[in-house]
Amino acid sequence: WSPETWHAARAASLDRLRAACALPRDPHRTRPRIVVADDNNPLRSMRHELYQLARDAGWAYATGHVDCGVAECERRNAAREGRARVPDETIAKMAGELERPQPERKGWERFSVTVPGDAPDAAPAAAETLLTVVDAAYTAGGGGGGGG
């Protein structure tokens, strides 16, 4: 792991998201297309970049923040092998830099939801909650709150 590798991977990820957002709309689709950017995005500026990408493409934008304690993150990371494992100091650094979504203060984050991530049985309820927020963003209309 290195900052250079991370920056290259982020750039490639953003390129894939741009390509997904540029896909032509299918007028015969009855359900929206959903693109998930599965990334930590601990800084608000990183999430805002994703919001702008979605807005400019006329897509809905929603944020799902999984609230997981550092100890649980470290436990899960310790169970990983090879390249999947990140340095322990990375987890501590990201936890210290994390800017949680503020839907009540930042209009572009209005379709954000925080779900618990520490409990192993929380995933189904968290997924349902996130889908509810995605549906609300889609219903609100494109360009940062809507269709896509």
Image: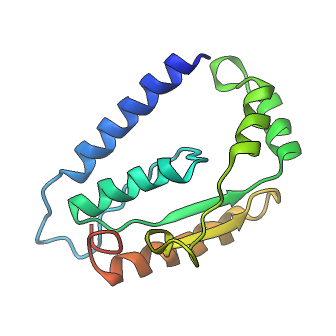
Judge whether 18 appears above or below 132 on screen.
Answer: above
Q: How is the image coloured?
A: rainbow
> Is 7 left, or right, of 33 in this rendering?
right
- Quarter residue 31 falls in: bottom left
Q: Residue furthest front?
A: 105
Residue at screen point 68% across, 49% down: 98
Which quarter of the figure has residue 74? top right
Tell me residue 134's x, y (percent). 45, 72
* Residue 26: % across, % down: 13, 64
Left or right: 75, with 84 as reference point:
right
The image shows residue 54 at horizontal and vertical percentages of 31, 59
Report x, y in % for residue 48.
44, 55
Number of labels in the image equals 0
Q: Residue furthest right?
A: 71
Q: Who's the residue at 88% across and 43% down the image?
A: 71
Check the picture and name the quadrant holding the N terminus.
Answer: top right
The residue depicted at 45 percent of the width and 49 percent of the height is: 37
Splitting the image into 4 quarters, where does residue 12 fall? top left
Q: Is residue 15 left or right of residue 72?
A: left
The quadrant of the picture occupied by the C terminus is: bottom left
